[in-house]
Image: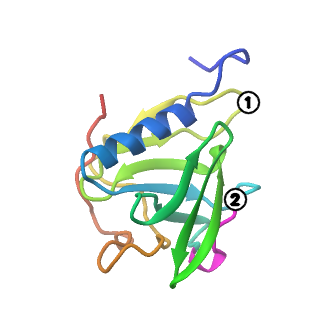
Amino acid sequence: MPGKPDRPARRPYLLRALVDWIVDCGLTPHVLVDATVPGVDVPQEHVRDGRIVLNVSPAAVRGLEIGRDAVTCEGRFGGRARFLCLPMASVIAVYARETGEGMVFEAETFTEPAARPLTDGRAPDTEGESPDDGPGNGPRAPGTRGGHLKRVK
């Protein structure tokens, strides 16, 4: 059922809740971003095929704000601090790096899209780079199967 104009969009609430849940579980929240959406501010040198995966854990970013219209924070790339701005429409998915549990959001339309849980047994394509978060904590290599995704209830 599409969102109504008199109600706030669901995506920011779901995104905020899932990031909090992933962190509370001791896991690493990653977001898959469509870097071609107008207003996206990420290091273009880390964008692959129009997408970038970002680690948004408290250890990887500073000042994470998940607002109604955008996600903003400061991340480090190659040791350099960088302001990031992700309009809400650019967030494709959120998931735990270690387990693959998370949610994929449907493409933006004229009304707020419904979200659908990831249930196909693999993480979304995770090409691109994450903010610096230590060795071995980057996105999975393209074409490799990650953890099994489960419906988040």
Percent x, y for residue 72? 62, 54
Q: Is residue 74 above or below residue 134?
A: above
Residue 43 belongs to magenta span? yes
Q: Amino acid at mark 1?
A: Phe
User: From this viewpoint, which residue is outermost toward the right?
Assistant: 38
Q: Is residue 123 left or right of residue 55?
A: left
Q: Is residue 152 left or right of residue 12?
A: left
Residue 64 belongs to magenta span? no
Q: Amino acid at mark 2?
A: Val
Q: Is residue 54 above or below residue 23?
A: below
Circle 1 crowding by C-alpha within 10 Å: few under 14, some 14–19, many from 20 = few
Residue 142, quarter of the rendered image = bottom left
Which is nearer the eye, 13 or 139? 13
Which residue is painted at 40% across and 40% down in the image? Answer: 18
Q: Which comes sooner in the sequence, label 1 or label 2?
A: 2
Q: Which mark is residue 17?
A: none
Residue 108, quarter of the rendered image = top right
User: From this viewpoint, which residue is outermost toward the front?
Assistant: 63
Query: Where the C terminus falls, by quadrant?
Result: top left
1 and 2 marks in contact (CB < 8 Å): no
Circle 2 crowding by C-alpha within 10 Å: few under 14, some 14–19, many from 20 = many
Name the residue carrying label 2.
40
Helix or strand or loop: what does disc 2 sit on?
Answer: loop
Q: Is residue 134 above or below residue 119?
A: below
Q: Which contiguous range is marked in magenta?
A: 40-46
Which residue is painted at 58% across and 69% down in the image? Answer: 49
Name the residue carrying label 1.
110
Percent x, y for residue 134? 34, 77
Helix or strand or loop: what does disc 1 sit on?
Answer: loop
Percent x, y for residue 151? 29, 35
- For the image, the number of numbered tags is 2
